[in-house]
Image (cartoon, grey):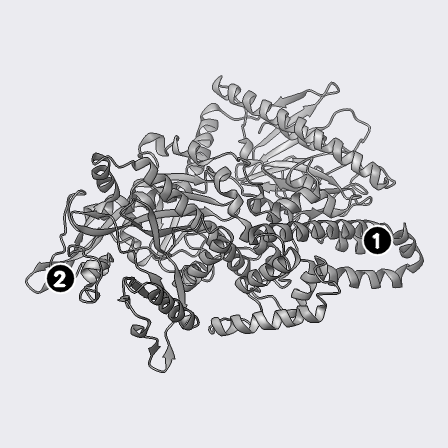
Amino acid sequence: MSATGLTALSSSVPVRPASLPCPAASLTAFRIMCDHYVEVKVQLEQMKSLGEDAEKQGVDTEQVPVSSVSPDPSSITLAGRDASNTSITCKHRGKSHSKSGKDDKNLCGKHISGVSVSTHVGKNLNRLEHEQTLHIKGTGRILQGKSETNGNYVTIHPSKNIQETRREDGYNLARKRKPVTVDSSKAKTSLEALKLSIKQLKWKEFPLGRRTACDIYWHGVSFHDNEHIVSGQVNKFPGMIEMLRKINLSRAVRTMQELFPEEYDFYPRSWILPEEFQQFSTQICMVKENDATVNPTFIVKPDGGSQGDGIYLIRDPSDLKLMAGSQAKQAVVQEYIQKPLLVDKLKFDIRLYVLIKSLEPLEIYIAKEGLTRFCTEPYQEPCQKNLSHVFMHLTNYSLNVHSGNFVHSDSQNTGSKRTLSSVLYRLAAKGVDIKKVWSDIIALVIKTVIAVVPELKVYYQADIPPGKPGPTCFQILGFDILLMKNLKPVLLEVNSNPSMRIEHEQEVAPGVFGYVPSPVDEEVKVGVIRDTLRLMDPRHRKPSMLQVQNQVKTIVNISTSGGWLAVTQLTKALWVVPMGLCFGSAVPALLSPGQHKKQEISSQLRAGGFEHGEAIPVEGETRERNPDEGGALPSLCLKPVYPKYTKQFNYLRLAERIAALFIRFLGVKGNMRLGPTAFRTFIRTCKLSNSNFTMASVDILYIDITRRWSGAVPDSREAGMGLQAFVEAFFYLAGRRFKSLVLREQVVSLLELCEAQLEAQLGIEDRRSLSCSRALPRAIKTQTLSLNPLLSSPAPLRRAASQDYRLHQRLNPRTLRANVEN
C-alpha cells in the first residue's frame, strides 16, 4: 500500500467527543462508519491500481503490497489530538524505532509482516499539515510524506537506487511464493501417494515432522494422531472414525429414513445387534410364515470390522454368531442384494472417493474417477450351498487378492481392479444412460454426508470449541457403492480411512512376496490426493463463516477516556465500532453490515443458513478453471457437488437444525452429553412444558431415554444424553405437540417453535444487557459487553448475567432497578 493509503486509513478514524452520546446517537454514528468503510475500501482499491501503474512506469517509490498491511486487532494503536488524553493503547504494544531521532516518539505502532506503520503527530496541534513515516523493517529506510491542506498527500522519495528497489521486490516476490509445508510423519500407508502429490505440486515435505507449525498435517488414521496441533489444516475430522462405524452410520441413516423414507431408500434395511436381535428374529419369522417361498439372505458385518474381516452370510436368525467369548458381538445385519449388476459374469462394487472440504459451510467434492473391484468367482444367487463362497459374494480387495483367480493387470480396462470410467464406458456402449447413473450416485453421496454431519459437528465442537486455537479439518472418504441390476446404486458402507496404497502385494519369486507398483491405483489415488491438496492450499483459501465468527470473538476493546473505539480485522479491512452500543448488537454488523441479529441466529440454527430451494454461489468451479503453477498441472479431478446442488438437497438438513439446538444447550465446552439440568433448561427456554406435560414428566422422559441409550452404547465416554438420544426425545416431543401431522411436519413445526422462542429470548437478554450497561461503571461494563450471545451457549450466559445482576444491585441498586423497569 502506498503512503496515501495509510493516510486515508489513519485520518479516517473519527474522534470521540468528550461527552458520551446516547445509544441512539451511537447507532447513528455506527451506521455512518459502515458507509465510511465502503468508501475507504473503494479508495484502497483505487490506490492499489495506481500503485501498480506506477510500478510499471518505473517510479522510484517504495511500494508495500496491500495484502501485507492487514492490521491485527491484538496490536493496534491509534493517535488522536493529544498524546495525553487521546492515545489509545492495545493489549500488545508494538515498538518501532526510526532514524529520525528520539523526538519523534511512536504513539501508534503495529508490526505487520515485516512492515511497521507509524503515525507521527507534531507538537503543534494546530498545524494544518503533519508528517507520516512508513518504516520498512530490517532495512532502516523510511517512506515519508506530508498531508497538505487540500487533502492531497505528497510523497518524499527516500534516497535509494532502482536496483535496490528491484532486489527488494524480488525478495518480496520470493516470500510470496513460499512453498506450502506438509507434515507427513503420520501418513502411514498413504505416504507414497502423498510424496508423489507433493512432488508434483512442488511443495515442501517434512517426513519426520517439524518443530514449527506446518500448513498441512497428513494423518494416516485419525485426527488425534498428533495431539499438539494448534494451527494449520488436518486431513481428518475428529469423530469421523466413530461416526462411520457400521452401527453409528446405520443409526444416522435410519433417522433420515424416518423423516424422508423415499429419499433414503438407497441403504439396505438394517438391524443392530445384539439389542435388536429379538426384533430381527420376529420380523423374519413373520415374513416366512406369510410366504413360504420367500427365503431372504442377510449379510452380517462386525461394527468395527474392516477389509472384509468377520463378514458372513446367513438365511436364518439362528445362524447368527452373537457371542465372542463372554462378550456380545456388536454388529449390523442387513438385507443382502441378490440381483447385482454383473460385468463379465462377475459381481463388482465401486470405490468412490469423496472430499469433505469443510463442515461450515458444508462443501463436498466427488472424484471423477474411481475404482471398481471385482469378485474372482462367477456370481450365482445365494443358496445354502454357496453362502460361504466369499470370492463370489464379497467384493473386498483384501479378500479376493488371496484368490488364485485374482488378476493383477497394468491395464485400466482389465483385471480384478479397474477404473470406474472403463466400466462406465462398457455400460454406455450397451446403451446404459451413464448420466442418470452418475446423477443417482451424486445424490446418494450428498444424502449420506447430510446424514452424518450433525454428529460430526458435535464431535468437532468437543475437540475444537469455538474460540479455542486449533486446526481446520478436511477428509477424504471412501464410499463403497453397489449397482443393482436395474442400475440403482446401493450404499454398502463408508470408510473413514480408505486405502491410499499405490502398490500391491505380489509373488515376485517362488515363495517370495513383495510390493510392486499398481498403475490403476496410482492413476486414481495420486490424483485424488494431489487435487485435495490443491483445494486446501492455504494461499488460495478464503475465510469461512466459522472463521469469521471466531475472529469476531477476538474483538479488541480499546480503553479510552470516552470508551469509543473497538477495532477488529475482518477480510483485510478496518472496522470501527462505537462501544456505546450493546456488544451483541454490534456483532451482526461486523459479520455482515445491515443484517439483524435475529436473522443471524436463525441462519445458524437452520442448517447451512439457507431455506429449501435457495441457491448459493459456488466457488469450487472457479478454482477448477484455474490450475496452479501456470497450467503445469491437469485440471482438477474433484467435482464440487455441494453447495452446487443446494436447491435439490438443502431441505433434508433437518437433523442439523436439531443438532444446533443440542449444541446450544450443552453449556460446557468440550462436552458431548446433555445433562438433566441442561435438558430441563431446553424445555423451559423453548416453553415446551404445560399442565399436561410437567417438568416431572420431563425428568421421566430424560431418565427413560438416557438409560436405554446408555445400554445401547456401553463404551460411551460420558454420562448423559447424546445427540441420537436427544433426536429421539425431540421426535417424541414433536409427536406429542403436533399429533395431527406426519412425523416430518411435526419435527419442522417443533423446530420453528424452538427457534422462535430462542430468538425472542435472545432479544430479551439484549435489552436487559443494554439497560444494565447504562448503570454500570466502565470497568464492569467492559466485562459485561465482552460476552457474545451469538457464539455462546445460554447456560453460562445466564450464570454470568445473574452474577452481574447481583453485583450491580450492590453497587447501585436504585439506578439499576429504574433502568430495568424502563
Circle nearer the N terminus (2, 1): 2
Q: Total label count? A: 2
To which residue does mark 1 refer? 772
Q: Amino acid at mark 2?
A: Phe
Outermost residue on the bottom side: it is: 326
User: Which quarter of the rendered picture does the N terminus lie within?
Assistant: top right
Image coordinates for residue 272, horizontal then vertical, percent? 41, 67
Front residue of this view, candidates 262 and 239: 262
Query: Does residue 544 appear to the left or right of 90 in the view shown?
Result: left
On residue 513, the disc is 2
Q: Amino acid at mark 1?
A: Cys
Residue located at (69% from left, 62% from top): 683
Q: Is residue 252 above or below residue 596?
A: below
Residue located at (20% from left, 34% from top): 429
Image coordinates for residue 806, horizontal then vertical, percent? 83, 64
Residue located at (65% from left, 34% from top): 100
Q: Quadrant of residue 675?
A: bottom right
Q: Is residue 410 above or below residue 332?
A: above
Q: Is residue 341 above or below residue 102?
A: below
Q: Label 2 vs label 1: CA separation?
A: 76 Å
Query: Does residue 327 appear to the left or right of 667 in the view shown?
Result: left
Outermost residue on the right side: it is: 814
Image coordinates for residue 107, horizontal then vertical, percent? 71, 41
Q: Quadrant of residue 705?
A: bottom right
Give the SS element for disc 1. helix
